[in-house]
Each structure stands twice: as structure tokens, then as C-alpha cells.
Amino acid sequence: MKIDEHLLKFPKYLPNDLEGLMFYYPEKFPLIVSDFEEVAPKIAGDPEAFRQYSDHVRDELWAAYEKIKKDYEKGDQTNLEFLVGVDERFSKIYCYRFWIINYLFPDGPIHDFLVDNLKNLIRKFIDVTEDIEDFEQRVVRIQRDLLQSDYADLYLQQALDGVKAVELLKANKKIAEKLPTVTQLIDEHSHSNTEKINSVWQEVYKIIKSDEDTVALREAMAVPLSQVEMRSSILPLYNMLTHAIEFREENEQLTKRHGGMLGTIDKYKDLARKELTAEEYELFEFCYEQARNFSMYKDVMGAIDEVLLPLWFGLHRQIKKLLIDNGVKIRERPTGPTAVSAHFVWYLPDELKAKVMTPDLVPFSLETI
């Protein structure tokens, strides 16, 4: 699908840019502009290409995170220069391997193009009534149904996998014996239970890996098991199992609603196919699929927040502590991922101030990050 060239330029504004990243990242990492403008024409008009690129970016994001995390944990966390350097690396992967998919595409002008076209095309295939307000409400309702993120492929697949996983866990006698204990721990919603929960999952993991009658379980959990290998961490499996138990009721309800929603969307598509021209319907299908991609990959990329942000914010607390211990009086203010560049930079030694505010002209590379 051809998209106007002006929409493929680097966005000038993002409506949900609470951190003000549009004012920092293009200055700190200027190559993000050319990176975006190089890839946008290749994937913005091709849903499959967008998915492939996003999967690649996701994999590199996680690999880079693990690499930096290891360096941070074995490094000198009492050294201010070291900590600022780690923050710079986190900022770089956040810019090149998170922000581009999580914000530049789904919050930028390309997304507006998709949503506006959907709305205009919906107006063409539903019956016009004398009540303009009723007509517009129906347009909005159909648009909402089509773009409902709860039914995006990834979220739905997780729900379906969760329901299946719980059924398979219950079907295995050895594992079923452990479920009441871990379910109670999870349902208490206490972070203090995490170690106990993961201890149970460690036992379950051994059963899944070794027992001959767990083939179906291994197949159902192929994705988290592959992530365990890729990330050299057992956490993806633990998270999947915990999520399956914690949201078992919600997953079952979503699975039941899925059939009805699919039927509703199919009706909209059938109606659009009848009422729109072939060219209009092609645009309708494209906008629907790509908009769902944008929604889905916000969830995909956002999965890293639960591990990256606590580590990153902990690093920020350590930087703040070192500054205070050295007699620096820091004005309190809320901060996020840009804490160093937007706040702490005012209190850093001059050479580190310069480092933080100097543009990084080195292209992103997983090997050199």
C-alpha cells in the first residue's frame, strides 16, 4: 500500500510524549531520524514487513538489555561515571529499539492516516440515518470494535495460550499437585511471594523438561521456552506461568468473547466488501490490519518495561545517592527514563554534563552497545 511521502518523514510531534523524548532523542541520537525515514517507506505500507521488522527490533531490544544488565551488575556501582555510562546505553536502546516501534509509528502521523481512513470508509458502508449523532456514534462504535486492542492478535493469543496452559498443567498429575499452593500465592498479589512462586515454577520447569508425558505442555509453551534459551533466563517461563494462573478467569472470559467478536468483525468486513469499491476495500483491509499491528506491538515492546524500568530507575536512585553523598543538593521532582538528561544533568560534574548532552553519532549496533 502506497502512503504519502510526507507521512513517512520523522514525526514532528507525538501526542503522548509525556517524557518529552521528541525534544531529547533526536538531539542525543540524531541517527534515529535517518533510521526511521529509511525503514518507514519499507514497512509502513506492508503489515507483514512491519511485523517482521518489529520482531527483529524486539529481539535486539531484549538482547541489548541483557548485555547491559550483566555489565551493570558486575561493574562498579559506586562510580558515577560508570553509572552515567550505563544510563547512556539504556537510553540508546530505548531510543533505537523501543521508542521507534512503541511511539514513532503508533503515535505518529502514519497512525492518524490509518485511523482517519478507517473512519471515512466506515461512513461509506453503514446506512445513513436522519439522526446525525446516531450515525456518528455507530461510526465510532465500529471503529472501536475494529481497533479494540484487547482483541489484537498478541493479546488474544496470550489469553488462548493461558487457558490451554492451565488445562495442561491440571492434566499432569505431578504438576497438578503443586497448583493449589502456587495459585494461593499468586492470588495474594504480594511481591513478597515472588520467590516462593518462582520456586514452584522451577520444579514445574524440571517436570516439563524431563517427563515424557509433557510433550503437549512443551508445545503449548514453545514461545516462552525459546525465550528462556534466547535470553539465558528462566524468567520468561515464570512470567508466562504466573500470568496464566493470575488471569485465568479473565483469559477464559476473553476466549469466550472472542468468537462473538470475530463474528462481529467478519460482518463489518462483509458489509465493507459489498459496499466499497475494490480499491476502497483494499485500503480498508490494510488500515485495519496495520492499525492492529501498531496496537499489538505496543504490547510486545512494552513487555520489557517490567524488567528494564525497575533496573533503570534503581540506577537513577544510585546516581542520586552518590550526588547527595558528595554534598550536592538536588531539587526533588518526578522523573522517568530521562532522569539523567532532564534532571540530574544539572548536578553532574562538568565532564559528565558534557557527556550526557553531547550527541551520539555512532549507529546502533547490538555488538557495540
Image (cartoon, grey):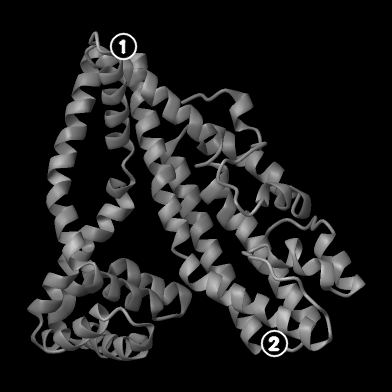
Residue furthest toward the right?
350
Residue furthest toward the top?
130
Q: Position of residue 301 (x, y in %)?
A: 47, 57
The residue indicated by pointer 2 is 75
- Label 2: few (<14), some or many (≥20) within 10 Å? few
**Depth check, front residue: 351 or 346:** 346
| Horizontal side, residue 322 vs residue 155: left or right | right
Q: Total marks drawn?
A: 2
Residue pictured at 41% horizontal, 41% vertical: 48
Q: Position of residue 332 (x, y in %)?
A: 70, 71
Residue 293 appears in view: yes
Which numbered disc covers residue 302? none
Q: Is residue 55 above or below residue 332?
A: above
Residue type marked 2: Gly
Which numbered disc covers residue 277? 1
| Res. 250 image quadrant | bottom left
The reply to whether callout 2 and callout 1 are in contact (CB within 8 Å) is: no
Residue type marked 1: Thr
Q: Is residue 214 above or below residue 287?
A: below
Q: Position of residue 305 (x, y in %)?
A: 49, 66
The secondary structure type at the circle numbered 2 is: loop
| Res. 290 image quadrant | top left
Q: Earlier in the sequence, mark 2 or mark 1?
A: 2
The secondary structure type at the circle numbered 1 is: loop
**Depth check, front residue: 359 or 47:** 359
| Horizontal side, residue 50 vs residue 124: left or right | right
CA gap between label 2 and label 1 equals 62 Å
